[in-house]
Amino acid sequence: MKLSHLFFGFAAIILMGCKNDSFEVSDISAERIPVNEKIQGDTAIQNFIKPYKEHLNNTLDSALIYNPKLLNKSDGDLNSALGNFMADVVMEQANPVFKARTGKNIDFVLLNKGGIRAELPKGNLTARNAYELMPFENEIVIAELSGKKVKEMLDYLSQAKSAHPVSGIKLTADKDYKIIDARIHGKEIDTNKTYFVATSDYLQQGGDSMNFFKDPVNLYGADYKIRNAIIDYFKKHDTLKAEIDDRYTRQQ
């Protein structure tokens, strides 16, 4: 038998072996399997991860700072001690980073009330408290906004009628929550100027319908998660200081 005949013989056998059979789905079934304490763990896997789990828990539960009183996001009308704390942390921790990179200072901070996900209990606080307070991976960004955009922000806050955390700006609303006075560094907002506003990347991208953050004059990343800023603040201070003050008030 010639070599060419042998080759074509093998090829024919291979092609016949690759013939596709047709299949049809005859039945579909599903079962809901609850994941709860009734599921028995695999001992070998549990023993393997045990040292890592213990190390992680020790890291998360080590006392970092003392908090003299319970803090929550609903203890004030238009500013809360917890919201003020978070906005002040962003200002304190992010401004040195921004200053070192650009030579400029953050003018003010705006976060969202909905982003505060837990209370801070009285007593020693840990990194776990920071994770519970800010479970998201949101990073701090600094948006350079025109004065016109800042005024759009005031309209947004007037409509929101809630205690969005701010730092570095003083706001006064009338009894119907409409903002009637806004001052940055003690001065009224100048529509011919731009302002550097620190916030989260989530809000800057239009989260919570904060569309005034879109299309800023410039946008600067801080490469700094809000949660990490909180943990760094915890490590830097002995006692947490947070109060309701006059930064965002409403006339009665």
Image (cartoon, grey):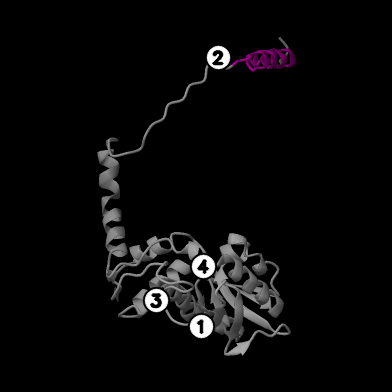
Residue matched to label 1: 96
Decide which of tag 1 and tag 3 comes sooner along the chain: 1
Camera-near label (1 vs 4) is: 4
| Of residues 187 and 234, the one drawn nearer to the viewer in this rendering | 187
The number of discs equals 4
Lower position in the chain sequence, tag 3 or tag 4: 4
Q: CA distance from mark 2 to mark 4?
A: 56 Å
Q: Which residue is mark 4?
A: 162
Please name the residue that numbered disc 3 is placed on: 233
From which residue to which does the magenta span run? Answer: 4-24
Amino acid identity at mark 3: Tyr
Quadrant in which the N terminus appears: top right
Say what secondary structure mark 3 lies in: helix
- Amino acid type, label 1: Pro
The residue tagged 2 is 26
Q: CA distance from mark 3 to mark 4?
A: 26 Å
Q: Is residue 102 left or right of residue 126?
A: right
Q: Toward the viewer: 122 or 172?
A: 172
Q: Main secondary structure of the magenta part?
A: helix
Mark 2 or mark 4, which has the lower sequence index? 2
Instruction: Please tell me which residue is depicted at 27% across the width and 44% down the height of the picture.
Output: 46
